[in-house]
Structures are given as C-alpha cells and as structure tokens.
Image (tube, helix red, strand yellow):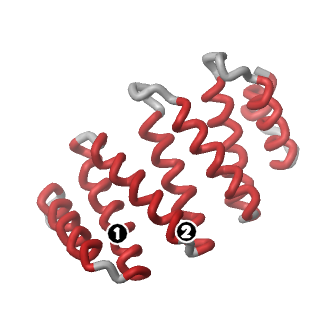
Amino acid sequence: LLFERFKEEATDCSLDAKVVLGRVARDLTPTSHPGHVSAIIACADILSERYEKEESRADLDELVTLRRAAWASMFPLDPRRQMSLSALDECLYKCFKRRGGIADLEEVISLRRLALESASLPDCCRSLVHLANALRERYQVLRLRNDLEETIQLASAALVLDPLDH
C-alpha cells in the first residue's frame, strides 16, 4: 500500500528510490497473496521507466526476469495476461536489438506466435505484422528461406485483414 501511494504522489524522489521500494514491495508480498503478480508488475513498470532513461543493461536483464515471472504467474484467463505477454515481448526485443542475440529473437518469435493464437480479431492484423517483422529479422541474420516464405504469408494475411485503403 505504501508503495502504491508513493508511486501515485507527485514526488521529487529519484527513480532509484522508487525501484528500491518496488523491489521491497515485491519481495514482501508472498507468492500466495492475490497481489503478488501486481507487485511484480508494479516493480517491473518502475524499472522500465528507469531503463528508458538510463538504458542500463542490468535493468533490462532484471526487467526481462520480472516480466517472465509476472506472465508465468498469471492464470490463463487473467485479463492482464495479454498485456503482460506484450510487455515481455517488448523487453526481449530490446535485448535482441541491444545485444543481437539470436536466442532473444527466437523467444520473441515464440511469444509473438502465442500472441497471434490468442489475438482477438481486431488485434489479429497487428499480431500478424509483428510476427512477420520478427521472422524477417531472423531471416536477415540466419538467411532461412522458410522465414522469408512465412513472412510473406503473414504479411499477405495482414493485408487481407487490413486493406490498404483502410
């Protein structure tokens, strides 16, 4: 409660202090508590804010760990699950762009496939394009013909769902 109130107030304290409080709130919330996932997400959100300003590799690594933990801790029907999946995808994509590690890109592709499977019709076009973009990036690194073919198929499907005149 203190952390939530502290975040909401317009204070001049540093992001470092907010991150510390977020970690404390996360660590003190038992995994059996209904607010445990919310504490992880809140901590990740504050850490994400600091990463956007400072671009610390350590923050990004911790952010990925927190986003993974939040997503893995949610029940399949949790309304935050899709947003959590998207946040994890974004973090891993930043890791890929920063380090160029193919393992990060592979995980992004897996997450985007999951996102596409669970996407509602209005979000399906965006999910198709995001997956196509990740496959195109993997094609640029590994030159796998299947990636290029699937990229074209996904982009074509996205065009059918979202015509150019839309």
Q: Is residue 41 above or below residue 153?
A: above
Q: Secondary structure at mark 2?
A: helix
Q: Residue at x 59, y 65 (%)?
A: 95
The number of numbered discs placed on residues in the rendered structure image is: 2
Name the residue type under label 1.
Answer: Leu
How many neighbours does mark 2 have within 10 angstroms: few (below 14), some (14-19), or many (20 or more)?
some
Q: Residue at x 12, y 60 (%)?
A: 160
Q: Which image quarter: residue 43?
A: top right
From mark 1 to mark 2, how far is it between C-alphas? 13 Å
* Residue 66 x %, y %: 65, 43
Return the disc, 1 or 2, that comes first in the chain's sequence.
2
Q: Is residue 25 above or below residue 134?
A: above
As drawn, the label of residue 127 is none
* Residue 81 x %, y %: 45, 35
Q: Secondary structure at mark 1?
A: helix
Which corner quadrant holds the N terminus? top right
In the rendered view, does 135 fall on the left or right side of 44? left
Which corner quadrant holds the C terminus? bottom left
Of 74 and 119, nearer the camera is: 74
Q: Residue at x 62, y 28 (%)?
A: 38
Name the residue type under label 2.
Answer: Phe
Tell me the residue that label 2 is attached to. Answer: 96
Q: Do labels 1 and 2 touch, CB within 8 Å?
A: no
Tell me the residue that label 1 is attached to. Answer: 135
In the rendered view, does 63 fall on the left or right side of 106? right
* Residue 137 x %, y %: 40, 75
